[in-house]
Amino acid sequence: MKLGFIGTGSISDAVIRGLLTSDYPVDQVIVSRRGERFSTKLAADFDKVRIEDDNQAILDQADMIFLAVLPQIAKDVLSGLSVPKGKKLVSLIATIPIDDMKAWLNTDAQFDRAIPLPPVEHHSCVTAVYPGSPDVMALFDKLGGAVAADTIDAFDGYGTGSALMATYFTLLESAAQWMVAHGSDYGDARRYLAALFSGLAENTNKSPDQSFSDLYDGHITVGGLNEQVAQTFLREKGGAAIHTALDEVFARIKAASSS
Ligand SMILES: NC(=O)c1ccc[n+]([C@@H]2O[C@H](COP(=O)([O-])OP(=O)(O)OC[C@H]3O[C@@H](n4cnc5c(N)ncnc54)[C@H](OP(=O)(O)O)[C@@H]3O)[C@@H](O)[C@H]2O)c1
């Protein structure tokens, strides 16, 4: 299998590094020279990576081609390229509908969208794929797992959920600062909280049959301190704030997709 990448930026870099350190069968990875910082380093690090200056040459030579430029330049980059028969396309480009890209490229090729996130480099992140062609699912499965979204709303829902990353760090920073204000060293508080949340994530991953609500029950003492913090969070409208934020992000994705 020859893979191609049009747009060699930070997310292509993570996907390529993840694939080339997995047992996914890749003969060659052909990357666009742009961005040069990433393409040069990839080619230096992996014998299987080759740089191409011309995006059409990537489409001509690779079997499965990943589109990974920024949404605002996607139309300019894709219009005028031609997709030879039998190619498979995977767009990582946020918000741009498949039908728009098919029209720009004048193709009816197999076309998926996917939302890989930086931890795919270490095979530790589940990637949402729409509509979820089996060969694309199999590829992302090697990077930590894949979920197929049956509808575009479900796919945009995963994109919305991925916007919680900064809130996770905000929660940890806020807790660490509170601990520092009560006498902890920042580095010790950071280490303590990082290990606590990593342990919780591990427990969660090892208990796939338990809902988050079951895990809540398993991690609290009724009337205890953890229950108290969760109840305060809900009383202070933390749950409602999360729903409002997700609603707003979902609406923003929908607006960008239709503009
Ligand atoms: N980063 C993430 O976590 C993430 C996750 C999922 C999806 N995405 C999506 O993936 C896409 C790329 O994101 P990114 O974070 O990787 O962005 P990025 O680091 O800015 O990478 C985009 C790359 O496209 C290159 N490029 C510009 N014009 C080009 C052209 N005509 N031909 C080929 N390449 C060209 C740029 O090169 P120059 O530097 O030379 O301009 C740049 O290196 C975006 O649509 C984003 O929404 C990102």
Image (tube, rainbow, N blue to C red):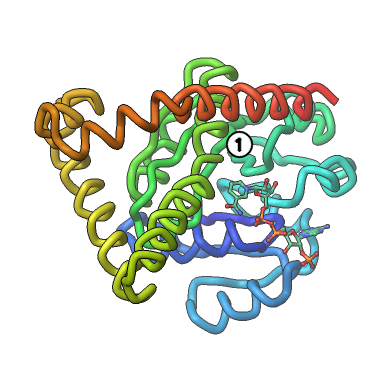
At which x and y percent is residue 53? 78, 68
The image shows residue 200, relative to residue 14, as above or below, that is above
For label 1, the SS is loop
Where the C terminus falls, by quadrant?
A: top right
Quadrant assignment for ligand 1:
bottom right
Whether residue 76 sits left or right of residue 202 in the image: it is right
Whether residue 15 is situated above or below residue 40 in the rendered picture: above
How dense is the environment of label 1, judged by Cα within 10 Å: few (below 14), some, or many (20 and up)? Answer: few
Q: Residue at x 46, y 30 (%)?
A: 238
Q: Which one is nearer the viewer's eye here, 192 or 128?
A: 192
Q: Which residue is mark 1?
A: 86
Q: Mark 1: is the Cβ under 8 angstroms from ligand 1?
A: no
Residue located 20% across and 53% down the image: 199
In the image, what residue occupies the spot 49% across and 56% down? 118
The percent position of residue 163, horizontal first and vertical second, equals: 56, 40
From the viewer's side, name the closer residue of 52 and 194: 194
Q: Amino acid under label 1?
A: Gly
The image position of residue 208, as x and y in percent, is 18, 32
